[in-house]
Image (spheres, rainbow, N blue to C red):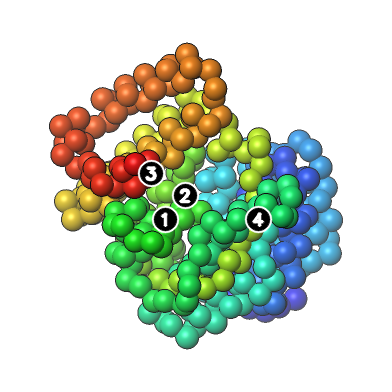
């Protein structure tokens, strides 16, 4: 058994027996060997638990915890509470990662102690390898300030580069998360809150010039379905963010990032609605719900005053 691990990898899973082993093999076989793997199973009813038990018996650096309810946010919080390593990362159980990804990110962070996270590029994967697409890419390693990272996350400024709220393409210094008690809400879009708060508390970020994360798109994933919960949880995440900034007495300073993030999120939410729901009457029903939530959660005049028309045009491709 390795006495001291350097990185913890947290893998939330639920009924994902078909893809879990592919994810685990990519993590177990990383070139960095002093790695701790924490799997959190949200009460799977398929063979997920059987796969987990096999790997626990054969690898002493893997542990599993069972939770019921709360979704991936609650599962990741369980992993965070058990993290004792210098670095931490997350990966969804249907994704996979290149074998030298974590070692290269750790090397970059060790050589750049002012940086609190390393952010890799992403390849979007489908059922055919021939359909792989670069989702986010960075031409070269580049150290940037956290406020610029926040701008790239929220789409505040018109840059050619962007940062995804996805969690699996980042290696984080765990002390930033633990010292500032950054946790995930138990909602959809939980990664939005986490990434905004992480960049708020961090100093610098390093962009990595390789697409290491393979982000697998399944037709039955959360973002390929739509329900009223998507709308209510979307507004709940921005209520959480606003409360956070107000409690920090920094809302006025960060409101441009907040409203830009809200605009970007609205575009993504409505794009999902229109792409997965073809019935016009159902679309109208959800749009009415959406508008009601805006009225309940925002001062409409304040929202209009903070809308960036140029940003809306960029998001919608106008």
Which residue extends farthest top? 281
For this rendering, which residue is in front, 129 or 53? 129
Find residue 193 and report its horizontal and vertical position in percent.
40, 49
Task: For the residues labelled 1 and 4, say whether their Cβ atoms are less than 8 Å apart.
Answer: no
Crowding at dot 2, Cα within 10 Å, few <14 / some 14-19 / many 20+, comes out as many
Which residue extends farthest bottom? 111
Find residue 211 and report its horizontal and vertical position in percent.
58, 66
Please indicate, yes or no, whether residue 135 appears anywhere in the rendered image. Answer: yes
Between discs 1 and 4, the one toward the N terminus: 4
Separation of residues labelled 4 and 2 (CA atoms): 23 Å
Separation of residues labelled 4 and 3 (CA atoms): 23 Å
Counting every numbered tag in the picture gives 4
Task: For the residues labelled 2 and 1, say whether their Cβ atoms are less than 8 Å apart.
Answer: yes
Numbered badge on residue 191: 2
Between discs 2 and 3, the one toward the N terminus: 2
Numbered badge on residue 195: 1
Which tag is nearer the camera, tag 4 or tag 2?
4
User: What residue do we see at 84% from left, 64% from top?
Assistant: 58
Task: For the residues labelled 2 and 3, say whether their Cβ atoms are less than 8 Å apart.
Answer: no
Numbered badge on residue 132: 4
Find residue 16 and report its horizontal and vertical position in percent.
73, 44
Residue placed under numbered mark 3 in the picture: 317
| Quadrant housing residue 145 | bottom left
User: What residue do we see at 66% from left, 63% from top?
Assistant: 97
- The quarter of the rendered structure image containing the N terminus is bottom right
User: What residue do we see at 68% from left, 59% from top?
Assistant: 96
Secondary structure under tag 3 reads loop
- The quarter of the rendered structure image containing the C terminus is top left
38 horizontally vs 256: left or right: right
Q: Is residue 173 above or below residue 11?
A: below
């Amino acid at each position: 058994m390795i006495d001291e691990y350097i990185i913890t990898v947290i893998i939330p899973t639920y009924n994902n027996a078909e893809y879990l082993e592919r994810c685990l093999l990519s993590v177990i076989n990383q070139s960095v060997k002093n790695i701790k793997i924490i799997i959190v199973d949200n009460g799977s009813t398929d063979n997920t638990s059987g796969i987990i038990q096999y790997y626990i018996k054969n690898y002493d650096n893997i542990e599993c915890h069972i939770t019921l309810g709360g979704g991936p946010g609650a599962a990741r919080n369980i992993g965070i509470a058990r993290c004792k390593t210098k670095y931490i990362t997350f990966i969804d159980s249907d994704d996979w990662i290149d074998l030298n990804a974590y070692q290269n990110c750790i090397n970059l962070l060790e050589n750049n102690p002012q940086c609190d996270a390393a952010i890799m590029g992403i390849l979007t994967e489908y059922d055919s390898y021939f359909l792989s697409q670069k989702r986010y890419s960075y031409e070269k390693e580049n150290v940037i300030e956290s406020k610029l990272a926040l701008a790239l996350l929220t789409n505040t400024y018109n840059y050619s580069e962007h940062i995804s709220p996805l969690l699996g393409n980042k290696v984080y210094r765990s002390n930033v998360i633990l010292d500032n008690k950054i946790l995930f809400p138990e909602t959809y879009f939980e990664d939005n809150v986490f990434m905004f708060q992480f960049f708020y508390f961090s100093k610098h970020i390093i962009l990595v010039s390789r697409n290491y994360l393979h982000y697998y798109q399944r037709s039955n994933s959360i973002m390929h379905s739509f329900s009223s919960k998507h709308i209510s949880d979307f507004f709940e995440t921005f209520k959480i963010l606003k409360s956070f900034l107000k409690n920090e007495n920094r809302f006025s300073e960060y409101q441009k990032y907040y409203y830009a993030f809200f605009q970007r999120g609205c575009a993504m939410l409505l794009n999902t609605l229109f792409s997965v729901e073809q019935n016009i009457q159902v679309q109208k029903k959800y749009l009415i719900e959406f508008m009601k939530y805006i009225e309940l959660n925002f001062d409409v005049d304040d929202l209009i005053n903070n809308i960036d028309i140029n940003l809306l045009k960029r998001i919608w491709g106008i």
